[in-house]
Amino acid sequence: MYRIGQSIDIHQLVANRKLILGGVEIDFEYGLLGHSDADVLCHAIIESIIGALGLGDIGKHFSDTDDQYKGISSLILLEKTYEMMSAHGYEINNLDAIIIIEKPKMAPHIQKMKENISNILKCNIADVNIKATRGEKLGFIGRQEGVVSQCVVMLKKKGF
């Protein structure tokens, strides 16, 4: 009746890229490097759902060598993941995610991220928790070289 999945995603911060997290474009001097829009939050959520379904990982379904995903919005990938989850008879019970980034502050953007994700996953916004923390100037996060996101998701069979 219930399935749990978890994931972590990491992307490098670079100049001349947009910083997009949870489908929100955030004004910042650096953005995330990747084949798609490199939205680490969405990627962690996507992979945790795929994992909960026992269907491998994000690369198996949305390969970073496939041109159809070049520059694609991760919200589109999240929508495709929702369709996969729904086709297998599951829905979101709840998810808990964290963004680990030195700068910029995430607090002003978290509500919009939650709205984007809950709308696509067709779940109550109260079932989507997103939080953020800093690297406290330690390691690659503290040096603003990259961003990490982690997610744990619990799926439930539809109708329960």
Image (cartoon, rainbow, N blue to C red):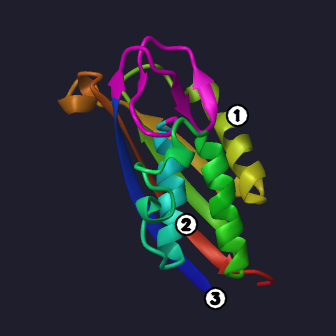
Magenta segment: 13-37
The residue furthest front is 67
- The percent position of residue 108, horizontal first and vertical second, equals 62, 24
Query: Foreground residue, 104 or 87?
Result: 87
Q: Residue at x 71, y 77 (%)?
A: 87
Identify residue for label 3. Answer: 1
Q: Quadrant where the C terminus lies? A: bottom right
At x 27%, y 25%, the residue is 145
Type of the residue with mark 1: Lys
Observer-side mark, 2 or 3, equals 2
Front residue of 37/106: it is: 37
Q: Mark 2 — residue? A: 49
Which residue is rendered at x = 58% and y = 40% of the image?
72
The residue where tag 1 is placed is 112
Q: Is residue 8 visible?
A: yes
Whether residue 92 appears in this view of the structure is no
Q: Is residue 73 left or right of residue 19?
A: right
Secondary element type, mark 1: helix
Q: Main secondary structure of the magenta part?
A: loop
Q: Secondary structure at mark 3?
A: loop
Q: Is residue 51 left or right of residue 141?
A: right
| Amino acid type assigned to the residue bearing label 3 in the image | Met
Circle nearer the N terminus (1, 3): 3
The quarter of the picture where the N terminus appears is bottom right
Q: Which badge, 1 or 2, is on the more N-terminal residue?
A: 2
Residue 139, located in which quarter of the rendered image?
top left
Q: Is residue 27 magenta?
A: yes
